[in-house]
Image (cartoon, rainbow, N blue to C red):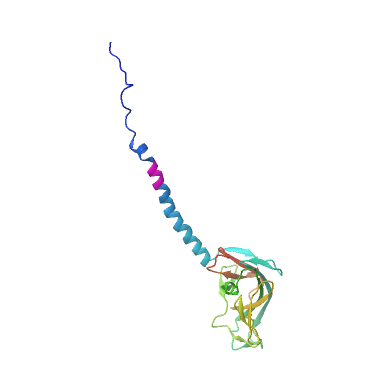
Amino acid sequence: MTTNDDSGAAAPPAGWWRRNAGWLVGTAVLGALALWLPYRDALQQYRQRNPDTAVIAAKGDWTAFAGARWKLISAETLLAGDPRLRGSLRKDAEVLQLRYEVIADEGTKAADLDRCSGAIVDAQGRRWETGGAALPRLSTPRLPDTCGSGYDADFKQVMALPTRPFAFEHLYVLPRGRRPDELRARIELKNTDKAQGRYLEFAL
């Protein structure tokens, strides 16, 4: 009598996929990390250079942002012919003078705040930077135009310190006749971890 008894026969070898499953999964994970980690770092660096998330400032009140508290004190428009403007200004332009105060948090240095920059944007996406060659001089004493340190009217150095408001101003040359409700002022702290891709936005 013949029987088919395979109990003593060796099991067939595992397929190639099964034999190599461990290192294939490991390779896939490492490959994904190799692609994702540089992308994450590049995205973080891009956001630090080009902040894209607004922190809306409370009108007339202090707003926490990037290791300090900020407040827009005043916004004033100066037109051509204003006695406070020294030098010429085109008749179709105006100077927007924004005055701010900032109070540094404990551990925030004046040099950290001095990395700030200001901008004005409108609803159409146009953007104006502070200062520029078209900006005439002012006859009135100027505040510092940096956010953490500078010199007062008596040429004494002043610095932003915790618990003490530090006043500074940003000046812009804009097309004449812009309505304040069409404009937003920005404080940006680029290339710093404290801002985390955000900027501070004020309604005028």
Q: Position of residue 141 (x, y in %)?
A: 65, 86
Q: Which residues are magenta?
A: 22-27
* Residue 157 visible in the picture: yes
Q: Residue at x 41, y 44 (%)?
A: 25
Q: Is residue 28 above or below residue 19?
A: below
Q: Is residue 139 above or below residue 188?
A: below
Quarter of the image for residue 172 reads bottom right
**Residue 88 is one of the magenta-drawn residues:** no
Q: Nearer the viewer, residue 81 or 134?
A: 134
The image shows residue 97 at horizontal and vertical percentages of 64, 79
Residue 40 place in picture, x, y as percent: 48, 58
Image quarter hosting the C terminus: bottom right
- Residue at 35% x, 38% y is 19
Corner quadrant of residue 195: bottom right
Relative to 3, residue 106 above or below: below
Name the residue furthest right. Answer: 60
Please tell me which residue lies in front, 199 or 195.
Answer: 195
Q: Nearer the viewer, residue 195 or 96?
A: 195
